[in-house]
Image (cartoon, rainbow, N blue to C red):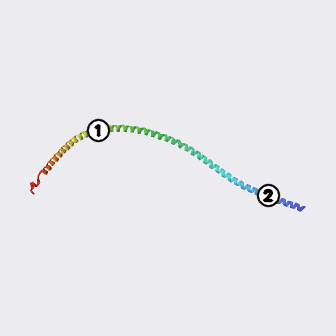
Amino acid sequence: MADSTDKDLKTDVALIKKDIKQIERFFSKFDSALESMTEISQKVAVQGEILKNTAEKLEDLEARASEIKEEDIKRAEVIHRRLEDHRKSSKADHQKLADETKVDRKQRNDEIMLQLGKMNGSLEVRLTRIDDRIKILEQWRWYIMGIGGVVLLGFMEVNWTALFGS
């Protein structure tokens, strides 16, 4: 029986060694997992800090954006007010210019009409003179044609053979 107890003991020792090895492997894996979790925990902490800093920066940017937006709204109001003042001023200037131009146009139109009236009278006198001259020329044309006809008729009536003897 000693043999069997020895064997049982050896078997038990072997089983215990095997269990110890499994426990060592378990703790080794546990240590690796713990180290990995520690690393992950540190990375998460770093990421948390990064997120915290990013959130702070984002809040600062949002606050700055709000300030800039308010400033832009104020600037836009100032620009709008200035544009409206300029539009009113331009409209008044345009109306004043249009009124002055209307008066100037009326004066120029009256001057032009007066000059056209004078020119019309002058042209009528000239046209009357030209008509009179044309009538005189037409009368002379008929006189010349009449004299030419008489001379032609006279040449036809003359006996040229008797005159020049042939």
For the point 60% across and 48% down, which residue is it?
54
The x, y position of residue 19, in whole percent, is 80, 57
Q: Position of residue 128 (x, y in %)?
A: 21, 41
Q: Horizontally, is 79 left or right of 56 in the view?
A: left
Give whichever of 22, 85 is nearer the camera. 85
The residue under label 2 is which amino acid type?
Ile
| Residue 97 circle label | none
Residue situated in front as seen by the camera: 60 or 110: 110
Q: Mark 1 points at which residue?
A: 113
- Relative to 32, 57 lies left or right: left
Q: Residue flagged by tag 1: what amino acid is it?
A: Met
For residue 141, side relative to residue 94 (left or right): left
Secondary element at tag 2: helix
Q: Residues within 10 Å of mark 2 (few under 14, many from 20)?
A: few
Earlier-in-chain disc, 1 versus 2? 2
**Structural distance between the alpha carbons of marks 1 and 2:** 129 Å
Nearest-to-viewer mark from 1 and 2: 1
The C terminus lies in which quarter of the figure? bottom left
Q: Residue 20 carries which label?
A: 2
Identify the residue shown where x is 49% and y is 41%. Answer: 76
Residue at the image position 25 percent from the left and 40 percent from the top? 120
| Picture quadrant of residue 110 | top left
Q: Reply above or below: 26 against 115.
A: below
Total marks shown come to 2
Q: What element carries label 1?
A: helix
Contact (CB < 8 A) between labels 1 and 2?
no
